[in-house]
Amino acid sequence: MTDYVEVQPLKTFDNGSGLKTAESKPFKVERGEANELRVLGLVSFEDGKKADEPADEAEVEAKPEPEPEPEPAPAKAAHTEPKTAKKKD
């Protein structure tokens, strides 16, 4: 089932179904396409809701923010002996 959203063109563009201008009437497009057009600055959402938000607030579950992970301790440098030249006998 495809979800459609009504959008209002802000700039002139052609989405494959004809030329749309800022003076064009609002039109319906699939939710994914509406998000892409919005990111490009070509349309605004006509129904006042963002296309990537659920239609009903009851569908949204309150999720607590995850606690930040503690920063790892800095790694200790391995102890190495300085290299010395061996004397030849």
Image: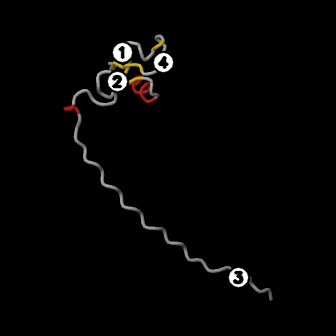
Disc 4 or 2, which lies upstream in sequence?
Answer: 4
Query: Dot 3: what SS?
Result: loop
* Residue at the spot of label 3: 84
Disc 2 or 1, which lies upstream in sequence?
Answer: 1
Query: Dot 1: what SS?
Result: loop
* Residue at the spot of label 1: 26
Query: Dot 4: what SS?
Result: loop
Query: How far is the residue under mark 4 from the one under mark 2?
Result: 16 Å
Query: How far is the residue under mark 4 from the one under mark 1?
Result: 13 Å
Disc 4 or 1, which lies upstream in sequence?
Answer: 4
Disc 3 or 1, which lies upstream in sequence?
Answer: 1
Nearest the eye: 86 or 1: 1
Amino acid at the residue labelled 1 = Pro
* Residue at the spot of label 4: 12
The mark total stands at: 4
Q: Position of residue 47 (x, y in %)?
A: 29, 22
- Figure quadrant of residue 48: top left
The residue located at (74%, 84%) in the rendering is 86
Query: How far is the residue under mark 3 from the one under mark 1?
Result: 80 Å
* Residue at the spot of label 2: 45
Contact between marks 3 and 2 (CB within 8 A): the answer is no
Q: Position of residue 29 (x, y in %)?
A: 38, 17
Nearest the eye: 82 or 36: 36
Query: How far is the residue under mark 4 from the one under mark 3?
Result: 74 Å
Disc 3 or 2, which lies upstream in sequence?
Answer: 2
